[in-house]
Image (spheres, helix red, strand yellow):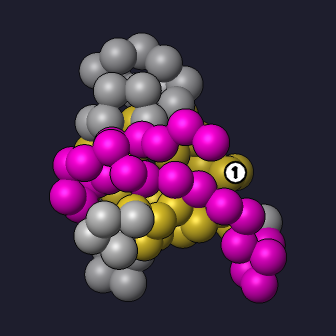
Amino acid sequence: MATQICPNCKKDSFTWSIAEEVSPLTYWGCHLCHYGAYEDESFERKCSKCGEKNQSKLEDDDKEYWWCSSCDRIEPN
């Protein structure tokens, strides 16, 4: 599985898995800083920076935000 840039520590160690206990959410976790967030795949939009439809809404214990897996842009919800 390919890794992405973690929105927390900015290292290439962010991966996803299916969160079976809270389906249909996807869990994103960083193997280096142990940051984690859930993605509801019904919320996806086109990124205003790179134009790709790879911007997902992530939610952690403190906040919700938009994250683009193509260009690593983070926008507040």
In the picture shown, does residue 30 fall above or below 50? below
Q: Amino acid at mark 1?
A: Ser
Residue 44 place in picture, x, y as percent? 58, 41
**What residue appears at the point 69 percent right and 51 percent down from the top-left corner?**
42
Q: Is residue 47 magenta?
A: no
Task: Quickly name the residue at label 1.
Answer: 42
**What residue appears at the point 62 percent right and 42 percent down from the top-left corner?**
1
The image shows a total of numbered marks equal to 1
Nearer to us in this view, 49 or 2? 2
Q: Quadrant of the C terminus?
A: bottom left
Q: Quadrant of residue 68?
A: top left
Q: Which residues are magenta?
A: 1-23
Q: Secondary structure at mark 1?
A: strand
**What residue appears at the point 40 percent right and 65 percent down from the top-left corner?**
31
Asked if residue 64 can be seen in this view, the reply is: no
Q: Quadrant of residue 20?
A: bottom right
Q: Is residue 18 magenta?
A: yes
In the image, is 67 to the left or to the right of 19?
Answer: left
In the picture shown, does residue 56 fall above or below 70? below
